[in-house]
Amino acid sequence: MTAMLSFENVELYYDHVYALKGVSIEMQEGETVALIGANGAGKSSILRAITGLRKIHSGEIRYMGERLDGTPAAEIVRRGIAMVPEGRRVFPYMSVKDNLLMGAFTRTDKADIARTLDSVLTRFPRLKERFGQSAGTLSGGEQQMMVIGRALMARPRLLLLDEPSLGIAPKLVQDIARSIVAISRDEKVTVLLVEQNSRMALSISNRAYAMSTGSVVLSGNSRDLITDDRIKAAYLGGDV
Amino acid sequence: MEQILVNGLYLGAQYALIALGLTLIFSLMNVLNFAHGQMYVLGGFVTYTIVSQLGLPFIVGLIGSAVTLAVVGAMIEKFLFRPVIRRSHREESTMLLAAGIAFFLDAVILLLFGEKQRGVPKIINGVFNWDFRIIMPYDRILIGVLAIAMIAAFILFMQYSRAGRAMRALAQDRVAAQLMGVDVDRYSMIGFALGAMLAGLVGGLLVTITGVNLGMGGPTSIKAFMMIMIGGAGVISGAIAGGFILGMMESIGLTVLAAYGDITYLVIFASLMVFLAIRPQGLMGKPWG
């Protein structure tokens, strides 16, 4: 079975500082894969490379059997990849409704978009209550739900989540984690999750890659990694 | 009193349309379009050519101005601003470019249309007179109503159309808009074309009342910048508020202050300075409404 998404020896640098040094990873359709590692390890760079926000300098990214790197960002969305960016990046002066509709920007069938909107609002009832409100007035947790909903509006096959627990009240991190599990199950969507909260990431993913200074240093089943001594020492920070 | 209000409203509607175009371009591309007044003048001359020279109906002239300026705006974005923004991260670069385009358009207008004041024959005759409290020629009423209708159409377009939503998204968060699949180059071009088109439309509207001449470009740009400074740069509601406030101030000034000489703009500038010292971000200062 060919991988849904693969990186082969991908290198990427910003102003001559390496962000990715020969990274190779692979994902199968239907999996939830976590990328864990400290700040600056290169996790977000992987997502930026996939979405076309950053050009890679060498190596190859393949998606659904086709070359992905070099594809314009807008086309990448059209091919079924949606991202929940770090720091949420809501459109603060637009209503929740318009934010969600922006998620479906590449789609044209209005009736179909309305159906997806319905399912997103059923999944996140809070968004229904806030439907006409400016996104900037929502709480951090509500904003995070909204941007996950916004990404779902594209009806993606591959969902990229960049630090969804960052800046969210600890109580809500659980909710977000549960939503991610439910989404991957209900929507049959493949999930690539970048997290500094390694414990959360490992507990909801099938497999994981641990990264450090631009390289993959460890990979395996999340269930095994969560008890791995090296992972415990480097990423889980003792007993949390 | 009623006369002052109506005059202010009429003037304000034109001004608001000009400011809307300027603020749209600013919010989408972070470009201060110093050539906005010249685009307005070009729009006036296109309507003049179509109506006075070719003898076609006014509405054809107005559409001609809109189309011409949309094309000019799209070209300016694609071939001038886009490459400069790509190569230079300094804001001065686009400011200089915009100033250069202003001089360039002045030269083009001089070559094509000459330096004379031009106008078109009255599109409607007659004067509305309500008991000598409000006196207003019908053509001014028509132009004012058209301007208000265009403002409404622009707001509806930005609020409810797919392209309008994309442009608002782009103005608020460029990266997030890209992640939604918005083609940044394409919508920057559409936005610039739309902004230039609004300037051209006002030129086409006002040539029927005040005529048009080469010297109007610079002062119009300055007024447009004043409006968005009053209202808050990059905000639709701010541009509209700024336009109507400036129009009203001018109308009041020309009536009340006329006795003291031609000091309306002196007073307006002085009050603007005081106002900006207290509220530098303008009335509705935020990136986009």
Image: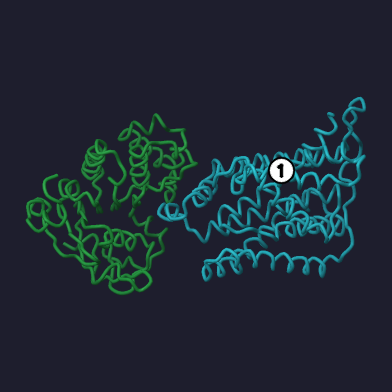
Residue at the limit of the structure toward the top, as seen here: B131
In which chain is the residue bearing label 1? Answer: B
Q: Can residue B10 be seen from the camera position used here?
A: yes
Assign the N terminus of chain A to one quadrant of the image.
Answer: bottom left
Q: What residue would you read off at disc 1?
A: B243
A16 versus B164 height, above or below: below
Query: Does residue A232 lie above or below A213 as drawn?
Result: above
Q: Quadrant of residue A48?
A: bottom left
Q: Residue at x 81, y 34 (%)?
A: B6
Is any atom of residue B64 visible in this view?
no
* Quarter of the image where the C terminus of chain A is located: top left
Q: Is residue A238 left or right of residue A27?
A: left
Chain letter, colour green in render: A
Camera-nearest residue between A125 and A12: A12
Task: State the residue at coordinates (30%, 41%).
Answer: A168
Q: Estimate the x, y position of residue A178 in percent, counting from the top left.
A: 22, 39
**Percent from the top left, x then y, of residue A171?**
24, 35
User: At which x and y percent is residue B210?
Assistant: 86, 49
Residue closer to the observer: B132 or A14: A14
Q: What count of labels does the image hold?
A: 1
Please tell me how crowded label 1 is: few (under 14), some (14-19), or many (20+) other residues with Cα within 10 Å: many
Please provide percent x and percent y for residue B139.
85, 41
Residue at the spot 35% in from the left edge and 37% down from the top edge: A142
A25 relative to B241 in the view: left or right: left
Label 1: which secondary element: helix
Residue at coordinates 50% horizontally, 52% vertically from top-left?
A: B170
Q: Which chain is cyan?
A: B
The kind of residue on which mark 1 rests is Gly
Asked whether, in this view, residue B128 is left or right of residue B67, the answer is: right
Viewer-nearest residue: A37 or B169: A37
